[in-house]
């Protein structure tokens, strides 16, 4: 499904006003039109949950996060940052289901490391959103901890032993942002993983929306649930 069709369906589903639609589109347009995002809209190349493409999952998460934030009673929130965290949260490097990539450490499997890959890819492909360090910290922390209560890999001795699929990009990202990723990934650390909510409300809302979208809308078959644990999904063969 192309992005316009997906967005129209979601706008109808959530009954968004024209003002909300325009606000939302203005923020996501430079991201969803990027070739790396467009590639992830192909469910044959990037199936994320069952047959939902990674791109569709991300758009769904972004709009659900925005709707939760707008309708909730959370106090002051930065809606733009919420949408950006959602648009970046799963921008990992390679498809995870039925992958043949061998990870030597258990804590380096996709479930634990993909938020780190997403943060690195987002900074690489969309550097302009990370120029303001205060905003960058909120976005990065939201991406890193979106899987909570599932742990994220902690970066203890630099990125070397993390077996990331986009490790080659790490050297080219600014050192202040690298330090934010490292510090965020080590909060509430147990051995080589961190189990922590995002420090910021914006990230926590995206994390909540991610679960709602994944469990209520996308994962419908037994094989797709099983894939969350085994990484193998017979439905995709
Ligand atoms: Fe994720
Ligand atoms: Fe997600």
Image: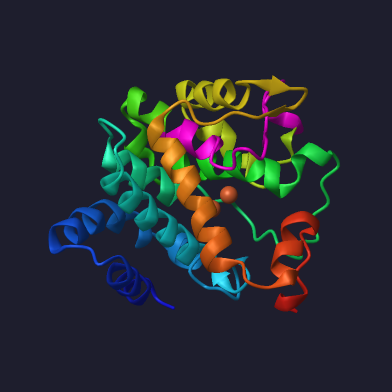
Q: What colour scheme was applied to this rendering of the protein?
A: rainbow
Frontmost residue, 35 versus 72: 72
Left or right: 173 as drawn, with respect to 168: left
Left or right: 123 as drawn, with respect to 184: left
Residue located at (23% from left, 63% from top): 16
Left or right: 213 as drawn, with respect to 73: right
Looking at the rendering, in which quadrant would you find the N terminus?
bottom left
Residue located at (48% from left, 69% from top): 41
Kindly tell me whether residue 47 is visible in this rendering: no
Q: Please identify the quarter of the rendering in which residue 225 is found.
A: bottom right
Residue lying furthest left: 19
Looking at the rendering, in which quadrant would you find the C terminus?
bottom right
Q: Is residue 1 magenta?
A: no
Q: Please identify the quarter of the rendering in which residue 185 is found.
A: top right
Give percent across and percent down for residue 11.
28, 68
Left or right: 212 as drawn, with respect to 114: left
Residue located at (74% from left, 23% from top): 190
Frontmost residue, 217 versus 184: 217
> What is the span of residues highlighted in magenta in the rendered image?
139-161
Give percent across and percent down for residue 211.
54, 52
């Amino acid at each position: 499904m192309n992005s316009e069709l997906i967005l129209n369906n979601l706008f109808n589903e959530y009954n968004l006003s024209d003002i909300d639609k325009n606000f939302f589109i203005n923020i996501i347009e430079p991201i969803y039109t990027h070739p790396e995002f467009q590639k992830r809209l192909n469910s044959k190349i990037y199936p994320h949950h069952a047959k939902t493409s990674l791109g569709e999952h991300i758009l769904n998460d972004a709009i659900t996060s925005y709707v939760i934030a707008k309708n909730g009673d959370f106090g002051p929130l930065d809606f733009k940052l919420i949408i950006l965290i959602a648009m970046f949260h799963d921008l990992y490097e390679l498809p995870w289901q039925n992958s043949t990539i061998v990870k030597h450490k258990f804590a380096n499997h996709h479930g634990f490391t993909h938020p780190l890959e997403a943060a690195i890819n987002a900074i690489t492909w969309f550097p302009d959103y990370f120029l303001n360090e205060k905003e960058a910290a909120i976005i990065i922390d939201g991406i890193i901890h979106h899987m909570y209560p599932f742990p994220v890999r902690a970066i203890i001795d630099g990125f070397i032993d993390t077996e990331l699929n986009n490790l080659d990009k790490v050297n080219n990202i600014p050192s202040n942002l690298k330090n934010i990723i490292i510090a965020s990934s080590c909060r509430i650390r147990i051995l080589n993983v961190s189990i922590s909510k995002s420090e910021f409300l914006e990230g926590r809302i995206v994390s909540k929306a991610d679960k709602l979208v994944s469990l209520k809308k996308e994962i419908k078959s037994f094989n797709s649930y099983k894939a969350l644990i085994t990484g193998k999904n017979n439905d995709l063969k």
